[in-house]
Image: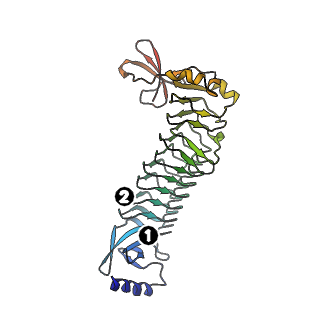
Amino acid sequence: MRFFTTLLFVFMSALIAKAYDFESNGIYYNILSSTDKTVEVTYEGNKKYSGDIVIPTTVNLNGKELTVVAIGKSAFSRCPDLTSITFGDSIKTIGDEAFIQCKKLKNFTLGSKVNLIACSAFESCKSLTRIEIPGNVETIELSAFSYCENVTEIIIHNGVKNIGNSAFYNNKKITEFIIPASVEKIGSSAIYGCDSLKFLTIEDSNKELFVVLSYPWSNQNLDKFYIGRNIRENYTNWREITAKEIIIGRNVTKLNWTECINLETITLLGTTPPASNEFTEEQYAIVKVNVPEEAIPAYQATEPWNKFWSLPTGINQAEVAEDEVEAVYSINGQRCSMSDNGVLILKMKSGKTVKVVK
């Protein structure tokens, strides 16, 4: 070990003027720890990576096997001809601006040990069309995927805990965004500017979702917003939530919102009315409120829910045999199918009409 440490010191001294410590198969590395034998991927001056790159799990230096544990800061930044990147399963962190403005990058595959995607790591990667974050990633930092304007699908697996400020800012083509139950904190403007977003889901959980600062999902033309747990915020402006339909899950016990413009329908799945601040007089008159059939008396006795003109209206929570259904309609009276989500009006072959939520 002492000989190896001395050898590394001499080797690094000889290369002190360079931005990297050594090169292997066209990829440049810096030594992070001679004791742990770990390295990170870095860059070489003005030379740019190109094509399809596979980051190995280990590299060899002077007969010693070193483990590749990180993509260093700006390692692949602004590489105009980089098209794909595959990470070895030893990679744990992707550094600040690691792939920023790699405009031809179409694909990336994260390894099973990546736990941090740092600030602006994939910002302005305009050829990406799909982003998938595995559950081993704990934190997605500031602007990590902002301005990825051609992404149409974002999948975040359960396990992710923190979504930073502006993490997916200005991803203009996504239509659906799901915040997994594992997420504990979401930052300001996290999905701000995602102008095509129609469906937003906060998955069911008994733990609160902490909203940092304001406007994580503001300025959206949402059709449907599912809230599956309590939200704790410093300050959140719900005024700009334009969802026509909001569904409140069974775990929600309190709501704090103001003037959700364009709101047409609120569906509450819990049998115990959640605490809530007041709505507008106009909303009390025109917004449809759906609650479980057995919970109608509880909502009729609880403010502010008893102020809605549409109460009572019950939801049948029982299973309905599809072969007994003659026709299916949305809450707005449009024909749809049993595979659709939300509040459905079922016309049964028996002549009975049933309201269910899926």
Query: In the image shown, does 306 or 288 lie closer to the viewer?
Result: 306
For the residue carrying disc 1, how many other residues have a C-alpha within 10 Å: few (<14), some (14-19), or many (20+)? many
What residue did someone put label 1 on? 49
Q: On the rendered structure, is 134 left or right of 229?
A: left
SS of the residue at dot 1?
Answer: loop
SS of the residue at dot 2?
Answer: loop
Residue at image coords 37%, 74%: 36
Quadrant assignment for the N terminus: bottom left
Looking at numbered disc 2 in the image, what kind of residue is underneath it?
A: Ser
Q: Position of residue 335 (x, y in %)?
A: 48, 24
Residue 89 drawn above or below residue 240: below
- Asked whether residue 89 is in view, the answer is yes
Q: Position of residue 204 (x, y in %)?
A: 47, 39
Residue 86 drawn above or below residue 237: below
Q: How far apart are the alpha carbons under marks 2 and 1?
A: 24 Å
Name, please, the residue furthest toward the right: 281
Q: Earlier in the sequence, mark 2 or mark 1?
A: 1
Give the number of the mark in front: 2 or 1.
Answer: 2
Looking at numbered disc 1 in the image, what kind of residue is underneath it?
A: Tyr
Q: Position of residue 39 (x, y in %)?
A: 40, 73
Quadrant assignment for the C terminus: top left
Q: Which mark is residue 112?
A: 2
Residue at image coords 46%, 74%: 47
| Rendering quarter of residue 13 | bottom left
Q: Position of residue 356 (x, y in %)?
A: 46, 24
Residue at image coords 45%, 72%: 42
- Asked whether residue 331 is in view, the answer is no
